[in-house]
Each structure stands twice: as C-alpha cells, then as structure tokens.
Image (cartoon, rainbow, N blue to C red):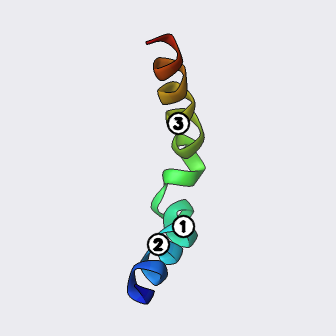
Amino acid sequence: MLLIIVILVLLYIFRADLGFGSKGTNINVPDKIDVNVNHS
C-alpha cells in the first residue's frame, strides 16, 4: 500500500519533467472528458 502511494507521489512530482504538465494535457484532457460525459 505504501509503495503505491510513493509511486503516485513520484509520478505527480515528475510529470512536469516528463512533459505532461508543461503541455497542459493534465488540464485539457479531463475537461474534454467531462464535456463528453455531460453531452452523452
């Protein structure tokens, strides 16, 4: 259980370094998903 938490924290910290945060995909993708769910 602890290992899973540590991995999630590391992914959250390093996602910007991996390019996910800087491109804004983490913000845009959930918005698109929410819009699709609402329309359907």
- Residue at image x 49%, y 77%? 10
Q: Which class describes the residues within 10 Å of circle 2: few (<14), some (14-19), or many (20+)?
A: few
Which residue is found at the position 47% from the left and 83% from the top? Answer: 6
The answer to the question of whether label 1 and label 2 lie on touching residues, with beta carbons closer than 8 A, is yes
Question: Quick one: SS at disc 1?
Answer: helix
Circle 1 sits on which residue?
Answer: 12
Label 3 environment density (alpha carbons within 10 Å; few <14, some 14–19, many ≥20):
few
Q: Which element carries disc 3, helix, strand or loop? A: helix
Q: Quadrant of the N terminus?
A: bottom left
- Label 1 packing within 10 angstroms: few (<14), some (14-19), many (20+): few
Q: Amino acid at mark 3?
A: Pro
Q: Residue at x 53, y 17 (%)?
A: 38
Q: Answer yes or no: do the residues labelled 2 and 3 have beta carbons within 8 Å? A: no
Which dot, 1 or 2, sits closer to the camera? 2
Circle 2: element type: helix
Q: Amino acid at mark 2?
A: Leu
- Percent coordinates x, y for residue 34 in the rendering: 53, 27
What amino acid type is highlighted by mark number 1?
Tyr
